[in-house]
Image (spheres, rainbow, N blue to C red):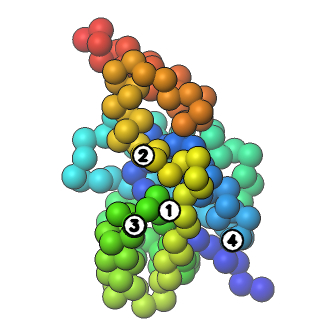
Amino acid sequence: MENRIAVYPGSFDPVTNGHIDIVERAASIFDTVIIAVFVNYDKKPLFTMDERVEILREVTAHLPNVKVASFTGLLSDYLRQKQARVIIRGLRGVGDFEMESQMALMNKKLNPQAETVFMMASSKNIYVSSSIIKEVAKLGGPVSGLVPGLVEAKLREKFRKQADN
């Protein structure tokens, strides 16, 4: 039987409970899920690539069929490299769908074997985004319950160091 490999790409800066929910659900469907951390050239990340990969490895350690890696370049090429055919994308609402559908169509054009599977965010995570989490944490607000505990601690540490500089 073929090993069904799915790739869940994102910048994950930082990873949220919404991301973890999508990963857990995808891991129950696919044999292997690769969380592929990429550089988003449109954004200045709070966490380095290595920090994001390490955090993701720690917060997904309970999922034996989930791997975490970083990549640069085209997602369509990365899929070929990993012999994966499925891209996992989380949707919070209709606003996400327009952009995500365009990316799915481009990935299909670049790699005709690629299929994108959209997973709706659970109702408790529908409003959670990495950018909102960073803004709230930067201003000293509570993010408990919205991100894994490790991420909450790393956010506090990161913003404390920025304030000290």
Side of 115 relative to 41 (left or right): right
* Circle 4 residues within 10 Å: few <14, some 14–19, many ≥20: some
Task: Kindly identify the residue that appears in the image at 58 percent across and 53 percent down.
Answer: 123
**What is the secondary structure assignment of the residue under circle 3?**
helix
Q: Which quadrant is home to the C terminus?
A: top left
Tell me the kind of residue under disc 1.
Gly
1 or 2: tag closer to the N-terminus: 1
Tell me the kind of residue under disc 2.
Ser
**Residue 81 shows in the view:** no
Q: Which circle, 1 or 3, is nearer the viewer?
A: 3
**What is the secondary structure assignment of the residue under circle 2?**
loop
Task: Kindly identify the residue that appears in the image at 67 percent across and 56 percent down.
Answer: 24
Q: Which circle, 3 or 2, is nearer the viewer?
A: 3
Q: Where is residue 12 in the image (x, y as percent from the top left)?
A: 44, 47
Q: With respect to residue 150, does 163 lie above or below? A: above
Q: With respect to residue 153, does 48 lie above or below? A: below
Which mark is drawn over residue 94? 3
4 or 2: tag closer to the N-terminus: 4
- Distance between the Cα atoms at labels 4 and 2? 24 Å
Task: Kindly identify the residue that appears in the image at 64 percent across and 64 percent down.
Answer: 26
Q: Which quadrant is home to the N terminus?
A: bottom right
Which mark is drawn over residue 129? 2
Q: Mark 4 points at which residue?
A: 30
